[in-house]
Amino acid sequence: MFVLPVNHPDTAPLRVGLLSDTHGLLRPEAKAFLRGSDRIIHAGDICDPAILDELLAIAPVTAVRGNCDQGPWAGRLRWTESLRVGGVLIYVLHDLAQLDLDPGERGVGVVVSGHSHKPKVEDRDGVLLVNPGSCGPRRFRLPVAVGELIIAGGRVSARTVELAVK
């Protein structure tokens, strides 16, 4: 788990559930993990708009379009999103290789991405880079995973969790 101090201390902890690359499959294990989130971020390759409705039944959702999101429904999604949660500016995109800004210069504390299906948390020059991995169909031998941010007391922590799936 990585922890990053932020400039805006909030007293109540906030939990942001993270997922990506569902590819049309929202597993019950992923939904169970996301329960209790104050907000959910989906980093693209949703592939079925019904997944967004299921997530909205849990918490408010911010989602971006991934390279596999096609059709009229996907046109309402942007390729990037920015949101502020508990004083932390979070930037969301599907493919980290397409990051076209310097997050540190823009005051971004966390960048959430997907695409690689590989869960990872990295502190790069004071910015947390989080890829929750894929919680949809298993790809190769990569884990089925999700992630979370906990924002509290002027700090943000991030972790990924491998789901036990059948």
Image (cartoon, helix red, strand yellow):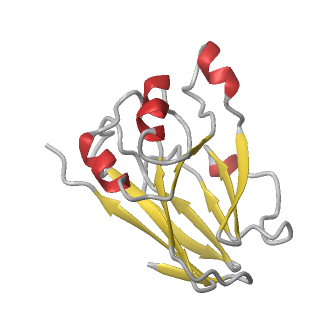
> Which residue is rendered at x = 62% and y = 23% of the image?
74
Q: Find residue 21 and report its image quarter.
A: top left
Picture coordinates of residue 7, whole percent (x, y): 74, 84
9 over 124 or under it: above or below: below
Q: Is residue 106 left or right of residue 26?
A: right
Name the residue nearer the viewer: 79 or 150.
Answer: 150
Quadrant holding the C terminus: top left
Tell me if I can see residue 85 in this picture.
Answer: yes
157 over 110 or under it: above or below: below
155 over 135 or under it: above or below: below
> Which residue is rendered at x = 86% and y = 70% of the image?
105
Picture coordinates of residue 49, whole percent (x, y): 50, 24
Name the residue nearer the viewer: 10 or 33.
Answer: 10
Quadrant holding the N terminus: bottom left
Picture coordinates of residue 93, whole percent (x, y): 66, 47
Residue reaching furthest to the top: 72
> Which residue is rendered at x = 63% and y = 80% of the image?
10
Q: Is residue 34 left or right of residue 125?
A: left
Residue reaching furthest to the right: 105
Q: Find residue 153 and report its image quarter.
A: bottom right
Name the residue nearer the viewer: 155 or 98.
Answer: 155
Picture coordinates of residue 72, whole percent (x, y): 64, 13
Tell me if I can see residue 48 in this picture.
Answer: no
Query: How many marks on residues?
Result: 0
> Which residue is rendered at x = 54% and y = 82% of the image?
3
Q: Is residue 115 left or right of residue 110?
A: left
Q: Is residue 90 left or right of residue 146?
A: right
Residue reaching furthest to the left: 166
50 over 107 or under it: above or below: above
Q: Find residue 136 and report its image quarter.
A: top left
Name the residue nearer the viewer: 10 or 122.
Answer: 10
